[in-house]
């Protein structure tokens, strides 16, 4: 099943809205994923710089966030690889 594929995978969630963070984290954890949550793109980028991009199997990000939006975050992540 789909949850078997996700079980144990590591997800980074970058989302500025607290309610959306909660929903995303809950859904991913129910699917069996390990979840790290960041409140914005800058926080997520700092975490990725510290741990490396290989620390996560997937990044889920909001497109519109203050400071650094999801598009900018993903551009920076791609430049890190």
Image (spheres, helix red, strand yellow):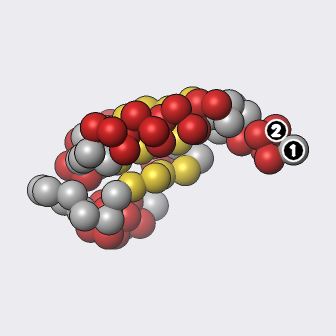
**Res 33 label:** none
Q: Residue furthest left?
A: 67
x 58%, y 38%: residue: 28
Disc 1/disc 2 C-alpha distance (Å): 5 Å
Q: Examine the rendering and report whether any part of residue 28 can be seen.
A: yes
Q: Examine the rendering and report whether any part of residue 46 can be seen.
A: no
| Towards the viewer: 55 or 13 | 13
Classify mark 2: residues with Cα within 10 Å, few (<14), some (14-19) or many (20+). few
* Tag 1 and tag 2, C-beta contact below 8 Å: yes
Residue denoted by label 1: 1
x 25%, y 64%: residue: 64
Residue denoted by label 2: 4
| Towards the viewer: 70 or 26 | 26
- Quadrant placement of the C terminus: bottom left
Residue 3, horizontal then vertical, whole percent: 77, 40
Classify mark 1: residues with Cα within 10 Å, few (<14), some (14-19) or many (20+). few
């Amino acid at each position: 099943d789909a949850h078997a594929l996700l079980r144990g995978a590591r997800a980074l969630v970058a989302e500025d809205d607290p309610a959306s963070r909660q929903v995303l984290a809950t859904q991913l954890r129910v699917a069996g994923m390990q979840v790290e949550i960041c409140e914005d793109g800058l926080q997520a980028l700092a975490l990725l710089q510290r741990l490396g991009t290989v620390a996560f199997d997937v990044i889920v990000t909001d497109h519109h966030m203050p400071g650094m939006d999801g598009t900018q975050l993903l551009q920076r992540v791609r430049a890190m690889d």
